[in-house]
Image (cartoon, rainbow, N blue to C red):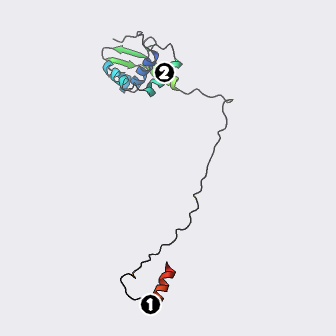
Amino acid sequence: MWVCGCVGRAVSMQFSILKVLAGQPNGRAAVPDLNRYITLLSVPEWTARMKRLSALAPDLDIFGACYVLRDDAGWQLTEAGYAFLASVEMPVPATTEQITSPEIIVTVSTPARQLPTPSLRLVADNSRGKASRSRKDQTNRTRVA
């Protein structure tokens, strides 16, 4: 038998319950599973998000509004609960007075001009082991270096 009642929980916790149920197959979860999921989601980002949502509906009562139904098998999100979540999470439509043309800034960067890499020459000095060299060979070696 479905029961629709009121439980005195914090509004952000109620939003967490709605969000968790919305992510479950058929919007249904057993209470131990709900507790486990909410415990896993208890991180600063999630808590801040739920607080922002709770500011949109400070008097939320998920059971009194019949957004969540309870029975012996667990809790289930109703169609009204899905609709409520959709309405709260929907962005507020802008009026024509608020709409401004977007400013598009394009920055084109050209790669730095690269100087050609100088060609490298391998210069070897093999004069140590040789006793005599002609003057012409020594002159050519000096010019290359």
Residue 21 picture quarter: top left
Residue density around tag 2, few if under 14, some if 14–19, many if 20 or more, within 10 Å: some
Q: Which residue is drawn at 51% across and 81% down?
A: 143
Viewer-closest of 103 and 3: 103
SS type, badge 2: helix
Q: Residue at x 45, y 22 (%)?
A: 82
The number of numbered discs placed on residues in the rendered structure image is 2
Residue 30 percent location from the top left of the image: 32, 20
Q: Quick one: which residue is furthest to the right in this view?
A: 97
Disc ID at residue 142: none
Q: Is residue 111 left or right of residue 17?
A: right
Q: Do the residues labelled 2 and 1 touch (CB within 8 Å)?
A: no
Residue 115 percent location from the top left of the image: 56, 65
Q: Distance between the residues labelled 2 and 1?
A: 92 Å
Residue 86 percent location from the top left of the image: 49, 24
Residue 130 picture quarter: bottom left
Disc ID at residue 51: 2
Viewer-closest of 96 and 9: 9
Above-or-below relation of 111 to 63: below
Residue where numbered disc 1 is placed = 134
Viewer-closest of 63 and 143: 143
> For the residue marked with disc 2, what is the amino acid?
Lys
Above-or-below relation of 75 to 141: above
Above-or-below relation of 71 to 108: above
Above-or-below relation of 107 to 98: below
Residue density around tag 1, few if under 14, some if 14–19, many if 20 or more, within 10 Å: few
SS type, badge 1: loop
> For the residue marked with disc 1, what is the amino acid?
Ser
Image quarter where the N terminus lies is: top left
Residue 16 percent location from the top left of the image: 42, 21
Mark closest to the chain's N terminus, 2 or 1? 2
Q: Which label sits in the foreground, 2 or 1? A: 1
